[in-house]
Amino acid sequence: MSRFAFLGAGRMASAMARGLVRSRAAAPADLACIGGAGTTSLVLAQELGVRLATSPGALLEGADVLIVACKPQVFPSLDAAYGRLAAGKLVVSVLAGTRLERLRAFFPDARSIVRAMPNTPGAIGQGITAWTSDQPLGEDDRALLAQVLGGLGDSLEVPESQLDAVTAVSGSGPGFFFEFLAAYERGAVALGLEPELARRLIRTTFVGSLALADATGEPPARLRDQVTSPGGTTRAGLDVLQGAPLDDLVAKALEAARDRARELSR
Ligand SMILES: NC(=O)c1ccc[n+]([C@@H]2O[C@H](COP(=O)([O-])OP(=O)(O)OC[C@H]3O[C@@H](n4cnc5c(N)ncnc54)[C@H](OP(=O)(O)O)[C@@H]3O)[C@@H](O)[C@H]2O)c1
């Protein structure tokens, strides 16, 4: 009998399962998982001591929460038995672009359905997950959800109408950040710095700048002005960045990601 059943045992599922055990919200014996044709479920079972299920019935036996963490493309071909067996249970889906309405059609008798949008830093417990539910969650289900999502990092509730924008901002956000990081590193190397030195300077600068913003609570524009003197080096660089103009470029990238999220979830 396992309280938390993981349909899918990859990066996201592993982070949630490990978080449940690390925070002592559940013992490994309280968890069960099932995968597809690969080996992730075997790895999770062996490394964490999670029960490895081989059928929908075995996965959901005694479970109170079903966490759906396979790839969205796999969802349409899932065994319909999962839908029936999830009756009365809390279903938490992290499938990108899969709306509550579609989840409810598959799990018609689930107690409540949560659609969550995590991001890649969640794999190391440093992500942020936005979630929405098809009906207001009671206190107990909120507590269960906090335990499940806790392994991925921070979490917050949003209306489903905002999830496409959230997908663009925090779901795709790491991709945009890494694109900028890569360009910054290339630019630093082009100035003649050794790649190793460039990487160290840039990463410490970015992490430290974010920590400074958090510690002071100052808006980014004010912090930027504090390092910018007329005629100085930062001003010279900003003249180029602001001539791009950066705001338009970022806004367009976010709109494109939001629009694609809308299309995919239709
Ligand atoms: N990674 C992210 O940053 C991120 C962000 C937002 C949302 N998500 C969502 O999180 C979900 C999981 O992503 P991930 O990165 O954890 O993927 P992943 O590491 O590729 O894991 C996918 C899991 O699904 C399992 N699976 C495949 N076919 C299955 C089937 N028929 N029945 C049950 N399980 C099956 C795989 O098992 P095998 O190893 O046996 O094939 C594997 O354990 C996706 O829906 C994605 O949209 C991920």
Image (cartoon, grey):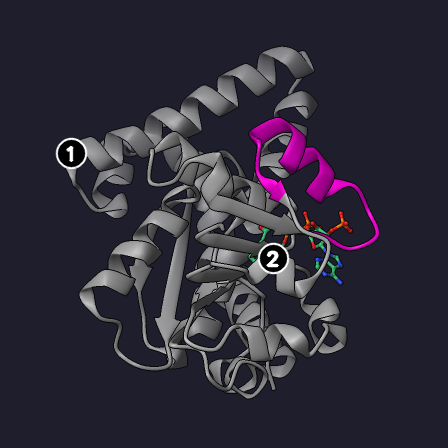
Residue position for label 1: 216
> Is 153 placed left or right of 54 in the picture?
left
Q: Residue at x 64, y 12 (%)?
A: 196
C-alpha distance separating marks 2 and 1: 48 Å
Which percent across, then down, holds residue 171? 51, 57
Mark 2 lies on a secondary structure that is helix
Per the rendered image, the range of residues in magenta is: 35-51
Dot in front, 2 or 1 = 2
Residue sitting at the far right: 37
| Label 1 environment density (alpha carbons within 10 Å; few <14, some 14–19, many ≥20) | few
Q: Is residue 260 above or below residue 59?
A: below
> Is 97 placed left or right of 169 in the picture?
right
Q: Residue at x 23, y 36 (%)?
A: 214
Q: Residue at x 34, y 30 (%)?
A: 209
Q: Residue at x 36, y 75 (%)?
A: 133
Q: Is mark 1 within 8 Å of ligand 1?
A: no
- Quarter of the view holding residue 78: bottom right
Residue position for label 2: 59
- Checking the image for residue 240, the label placed there is none
Query: Per the image, is 7 magenta?
Result: no
Q: Amino acid at mark 2?
A: Leu
Which percent across, then down, holds residue 79? 72, 73
